Image (tube, rainbow, N blue to C red):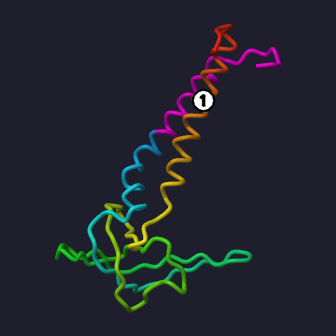
Amino acid sequence: MSSGRRRSPAFTVVMLLVAVLVVSLGAANADRSLRAARAEGTPGTFTGTRLDCVQHPGHESCTCYGTYVPDTGGPERTDVYLYGRERQSCPMGESAPAVDVGAASRVYGPEGSNEWIMTAAMVLAGLGLGGWAIRSWLASSGVSAG
């Protein structure tokens, strides 16, 4: 800290708690994100039944809802959405291959997903925030951080 002002120990504790929260949220989703990236799960078919779209300035965002039926003959899941689909790629009234990786309300196409990027970013941001808080605390305490 170059300002010469000492940070409150409470501020450091709060920053460390936020860092732990962010890391734990990211880490809790890591397994599912990696399975989704590799499309590892229960293969089946998805049939689109509803398309919900929202218009934003310059673009449109859509969610493709439907029914998922596993190839293994397990229970049919209704009102799930197929991740990463838009108006043109939603299989409305048609069957398309899909993979259930264990997410509560969504399934994925056989190409997988890029959700792992956000998961990794959350974990790295939390680790960075925690490292910064510890380094600031050590610097204000007069302890060398390395």
Most extreme residue toward the bottom, as rendered?
93
Residue at coordinates 60% horizontally, 34% vertically from top-left? Answer: 128
From the top left corner, tell me how far across and down residue 133 is, in percent.
62, 25
Residue at coordinates 40% horizontally, 45% vertically from top-left? Answer: 28
**In terms of image quadrants, where is residue 24?**
top left
Dot 1: what SS? Answer: helix
Q: Label 1, on which residue?
A: 15
Most extreme residue toward the right, as rendered?
3
Q: Is residue 42 left or right of residue 108?
A: left
Q: Is residue 109 left or right of residue 2?
A: left
From the top left corner, tell me how far across and down residue 143 is, in percent.
64, 8
Q: Residues within 10 Å of mark 1 (few under 14, many from 20)?
A: some
Q: Quadrant of the C terminus?
A: top right
From the top left corner, tell me how far across and down residue 130 is, in percent.
57, 29
- Residue range (magenta): 1-23
Compared with 120, 47 (above or below) is below
Q: Is residue 12 magenta?
A: yes
Residue at coordinates 31% horizontally, 61% vertically from top-left? Answer: 102
Q: Is residue 47 magenta?
A: no
The secondary structure making up most of the magenta span is helix
**In the depicted view, which residue is nearer to us: 64 or 124?**
124
Compared with 95, 85 (above or below) is above
Q: Quadrant of the N terminus?
A: top right
**In the depicted view, which residue is nearer to us: 6 or 117?**
117
Most extreme residue toward the top, as rendered?
142
Compared with 129, 9 (above or below) is above
- Amino acid carrying label 1: it is Met
From the top left corner, tell me how far across and down residue 142 is, in percent.
68, 7
**In the depicted view, which residue is nearer to us: 58 or 113?**
113
Residue at coordinates 51% horizontally, 42% vertically from top-left? Answer: 123
